[in-house]
Amino acid sequence: MSTDSAFSYENLAATAKAAPSGTTAFHSTLVPLLKSWKTPLYSFNAEILDNALKSVDANTCSLVYLQITTDALKLASTAEHVELSLAALAHVSTKVDLYQLQACPRVMHHLALALKSIGMETQEHGRICQLLLAMVEQINLQMISTRHSTKSKKGKAAKTKLESLGADSNRGVRITPLHIECLKQCLLARRRQLHLQTMQTVIQVRLDAFGSLTIETRARSFMEYHLYASMVCIGLDEFEWALQMLYLMFALPARHASTIQVAAYKRLLLLNLAVNGKKAKLPSFFAGSHLRVLENNAAGYVSLADMFTSKSMGQAMSKLQEMQATLENDENWGLVNRILHMMPRHFIKRVGSAYSSVGMQKLMDITGFAFCPLAAGDPFAELAQYIQNMNDPSVVLEQPAGTTTAKDAIVRFTDARATISAAEQRSSTDCIVNEQQWAMLVSEKAKELEELCQHLSKLDRHLALTKECVFIGKDQN
């Protein structure tokens, strides 16, 4: 053990007991000590860890013992040491107080790094993710239940600011290093159940408008969080959530485009092709100079997106095969495999913009479905099965009388707006295309007019009973 008395567990534990959370001594003595902390051991010491666990209670600073456990994780060199350290973390993490973490977020940063190292050594990503999920859930609950309002001597300024921001605008979850590391460990674990838990605990929460609790820059933490969150969403086929996470990464003001944004832009282009069948467009306020940097660094992806929207499926497949090495190096080949199953849908629906009906042979030639990996056997049978699985009312597969093979079938394209309710159609397109919509519109307008007449009648009766109206009437007479 080191001889430096300033960095000793005895000194740290004594200070923790003398200065519990929320006191002046906690901020003046303990926080500076934790911020400049250096591990006083050169090797793992199970006795110190055991003594620390026995000392944890509600009256002491649990953040101190979290730091001791972090040191143990860093020094663990055997499977037994790792087991003891993770068990200690599971016990200490239940005592962690948000107030302490706010005072010294560096401890969370060190803990996240230690857990990352343990995960790489032991490959127990699932267990580490479970520990982090428990800690993150506890921290989230404390964040959501805590009000962070600005106080002033008069109180009027604080009240005005809260009213302008809204009652719940400052209640939410702030990103911490534990949130980000939890997403990483979830991805490495590759377990669907963990993905579902992470989606609920880490992703489907409202983020606070006032930043994060990280020692990194807020922009970097924000982008890392949303990048890894999008990957978790993709693993669960929550593509709309994933698109939302990726688009948010380009909502930050910055002097230049970052490497993280380049990686996100590549995934955004691929994912939007799969979901919407077209090239993704960044927000209009995103700087044009930054966009040019992104497109230069993702030139192949941009070319693929342009080809996808203007060429046939066969040409798009050729481009994908040409980019396979690049996609694998960027770890995006798995996402491409998902695109291959969703890609024919957009090519088929695109034919409907020019034809009201088309034979299977012509549809095969236009779309190039024969080049799709899904057409492994009989391409016409696979195409017919794919159209049926689309379950799209605007694309109807019909088998003419006297024919039995899929090659003889006919595909009819109907106006998708005619297959939904009149209210849904009008709210989405503001266009009227059938008599049902006209009838519904007239009925709604008549109802609105009747309600307006009733409101005016009540207003007249109310005004007739007010003193102001009576006096005005007498003056006019």
Image (cartoon, rainbow, N blue to C red):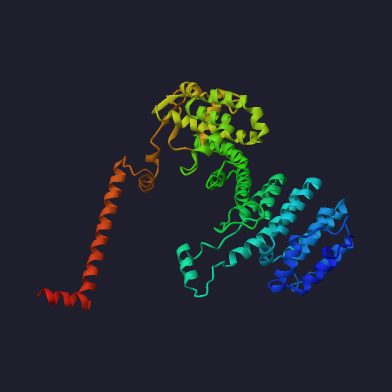
Observer able to see residue 58:
yes
Q: Position of residue 194 (x, y in %)?
A: 68, 50
Q: Quadrant of the C terminus?
A: bottom left
In this rendering, the count of numbered labels is 0
Above or below, 269 against 120 in this view is above
Above or below, 440 against 379 in this view is below
In the drawing, does residue 295 fall left or right of residue 16? left
Observer able to see residue 397:
no
Q: Which of the 4 image quadrants contains residue 178?
A: bottom right
In the drawing, does residue 165 fall left or right of residue 61? left
Residue 192 versus residue 406: which sits nearer the camera? 192
In the drawing, does residue 210 fall left or right of residue 130? left
Picture residue at 64% right of the left edge, 35% below the top: 332
Residue 446 versus residue 202: which sits nearer the camera? 202
Residue 171 versus residue 366: which sits nearer the camera? 171
Q: Quadrant of the N terminus?
A: bottom right
Q: Which of the 4 image quadrants contains residue 208?
A: bottom right
Q: Position of residue 360 (x, y in %)?
A: 48, 24
Q: Position of residue 160 (x, y in %)?
A: 46, 68
Q: Position of residue 283 (x, y in %)?
A: 48, 43
Picture residue at 67% right of the left edge, 32% below the top: 328
Q: Which of the 4 image quadrants contains residue 91?
A: bottom right
List the single residue furthest toward the left: 477
Picture residue at 84% right of the left edge, 54% below the top: 75
